[in-house]
Image: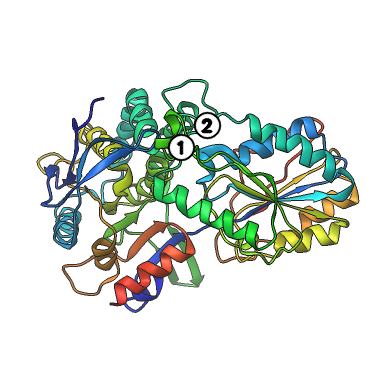
Amino acid sequence: MSASGAKNLKRFGLELGGKTPVLLFDDADLDKALPAIEKALTVFAGQFCMTGSRLLVHRPILDSVRKKLAARFEAVKAGPAADPTSMMGPMINLAAVKRVDGMVEAAIVQGAKVVVRGGPFKEGPLARGAFYRPALLEITDHSMPIAQDEVFGPVLVMQAFDTEAEAVDLANNSAYGLAASVWSTNIDVPCASRARSTLAPSGSTTGRSFTAKPRRAATSRAVSVD
Amino acid sequence: MTSGQLNARHWIGGEWVDSKDRLDSINPATGEAIGTYANGGEAEATKAIAIAKQAFLDTDWRENRRLRAKAINEMAARFEARMDDLVDILALENGKIVGEARFEVAMAAPKLRFYAALALTEFGRAIQTEPGHYSTVYREAMGVAGIIAPWNSPIVLFIRSLAPALASGCTVVGKLPGWTAQTNARMCELFAEVKSLPGGRAQRLLRITWQWRACDRRFTGRSRDQLYGQFAHRSGDVGVGRQESEAVRT
């Protein structure tokens, strides 16, 4: 569109996609961070340009995060808006469910480890709806399509890092650059603050702060990166 | 809401316009049809752009900033008054749970009020570049703005482009997604309630249609009956953008 319009000197504002990295350091307060990380994935059933879709976890807390986040994802109640206890609505249509599930299946074939499979309901009254329960996949290769392509659904890929530099490299290893967040109890310690200053959107889109997520808690802070 | 009751049409030149092609609107939570919508094409897009261009030329909208601020503030008030109505249809058709739908709809009025204020406070620039020489930059509306909004948050992602376009004095052709056609139509009902949009040509400042490719072609094309102004705003994935680009070339 941009190219065809450019031929006639049309001016465009384009907002494109995202593959938002979430950096979780070992000094983060998980009781505050994990609910926000869950919501960052499940809000609008993951159909959000700023969906937090890549979780980068400091290795010392990896096992704990895997276990706690898996429990949270399993407890997410997908259901219709008409049910006030629903925690996450359906995707836009069945074609979207099929597309997302195809991406997840391909990732598993390519070596992603399933922590929570999630996916469509196979039976019951919700099976006819376009529901997709949240999925958590663990990877070690950040070049995989599931880590590089925008899924636009409730699928989170998790990868461990050992050093701050590695975390920043992974976060910036993306064609997108819409949003990012950093979780730490002390944003002033070198680790988190340097991550903040060196995280740079690398894509062609305008950076936007992920305002739905931060909830700047007293002991745990998310930093939006433009 | 029972099946088949909802009927979404285009809103072009202040009138509800149908299309030969009608598609089903689906409740994504159940897979059931909740109504049908007019699936427009190049003819509707061309007509909408022509009328928006005429409204731009014939009314004082582009020059009357007080009128624009008044109308846009009125629009904000309508969004506040019909909040629950919009939340209901958005939740039904897009699938958002109620809290999320409310979160989206609640963002519309503040954005409109912000840009209504900007409509009154755009000063331009002036400078004495050297003795006796003055440079003045006075900003004027370009013409018709084409706005393409996506289905994931169709209300707020349309309003955030619509509000600055109207505030600056442009007229607008909106291309909204078929998958949220009933929500779009509900929003258009609300626009139709904005009394301060220029009388006589009431609501001709806005035309809303929904269909992808023909509309995109109209937004990017060159001929004079196509988009008069020179600004189009779209949201979507990079890949979709590329596909659209391919579609426009062919």
Question: Residue at the location (62% across, 62% down)?
Answer: A148
Q: Is residue B70 left or right of residue B122?
A: left
Q: Is residue A130 left or right of residue B222?
A: right
Q: Is residue A73 above or below residue B62?
A: above
- Element assignment for label 2: loop
Q: Is the Cβ of the residue at disc 2 closer than 8 Å to that at disc 1? A: yes
Q: Residue at x 83, y 50 (%)?
A: A193
Q: Residue furthest front?
A: A123
Of B226 and A145, nearer the camera is A145
- Look at mark 2 in the image and give the residue it sits on: A78
User: Is residue B18 among the parts visible in the rendering?
Assistant: yes
Mark 2 / mark 1, whichever is N-terminal: 2
Q: What's the chain of the residue with tag 1?
A: A
Q: Nearer the viewer, residue B171 or A134?
A: A134
Residue A184, by quadrant, is top right
> Residue under circle 1?
A90
